Image (tube, helix red, strand yellow):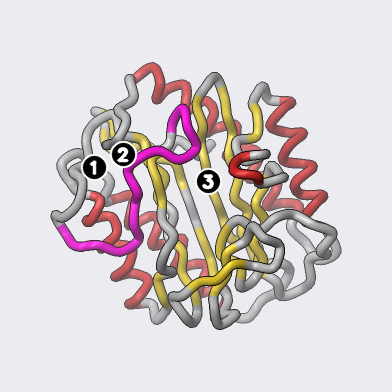
Amino acid sequence: MALIKSEKEIETMREGGRILATIMEGLKKKIAPGITTLSLDDFAEKEIISRGGKPSFKNYQGFPNTLCTSINQVIVHGAPSSYILREGDIITLDCGVLYKGFHTDMAVTVPVGRVDEETLRLIRETKKALKRGIKKTREGNTIGDIGNTISRHINNAGFSVVRGLCGHGIGKAVHEEPQVLNEGKRRKGLKLQRGMVICIEPMASMGSQEIKDSDDGFGIETVDGSLSAQFEHTVAITREGCVVLTEI
């Protein structure tokens, strides 16, 4: 059962979401060959605290950092380390902010330096899948409508929808009901209601849909080592329609 938020609570989440989006823009500008993922994590934590928030992910279910840094075949939850980014890598930055009692969550995949055209296309099409999922997020539609739109777009682009991972509700907890799957059937699943706040996060790979645990004990990666991309926004269903909370 989804937890319904009041207009005041959604406005508080919008404030936190703007903080998160601003920090994410700063992180994206830092992505370049030669930088370590630990330095990105340090930047994110300092920025969140300086703006009156707290890191949502740090110590959540044992995760040791503020920022998830998932590189190349790692889809989600990669832990920052001394790894030095190299030309041609891609990195997914996933971050959450706790602000005035409410969490927001967002993710982007960014190329490191110059990457090949097919990798850029993977990133572009995954981002487009998020936009299409957001367009389906309105009162009266269903969770299945969102997942169906995302999966059709990713599959039509020639990529695979990652299985076993999904979006989620969010609010006073980082993860709330409902699960927001990236596959589904139209008009099936939970009906969307005004006051619901969810994270939509399509994840696509160039190869297999299947996943496995990464060696760092936190990340989850494609079983065949194929590149993957992820984009995520926190959105609210309001009387004005679907509002993206994690944007400036």
Closer to viewer: mark 2 or mark 3: 3
Of 111 and 1, the residue lying toward us: 1
Residue 174 part of the magenta segment: yes
**Disc marking residue 138:** 1
Mark 2 surroundings within 10 Å by alpha-carbon count, few (fewer than 14), some (14 through 19), many (20 or more):
some
Residue 206 to residue 71: above or below:
below
Say above or below: 224 vs 184: below
Q: Position of residue 80 (x, y in %)?
A: 74, 54
Q: Amino acid at mark 3?
A: Met
Identify the residue at image location x=55%, y=71%.
212
Q: Secondary structure at mark 3?
A: strand
Image quadrant for the C terminus?
top right
Residue at the spot of label 2: 242
Of the image marks 2 and 3, the number of the one nearer the N terminus:
3
Per the rendered image, the range of residues in magenta is: 171-186
Circle 3 residue: 106
Image side of residue 122 versus residue 93, left or right: left
Task: State which quadrant residue 236 falls in.
Answer: top left
Relative to residue 106, is residue 217 depicted above or below?
Answer: below
Q: Secondary structure at mark 1?
A: loop
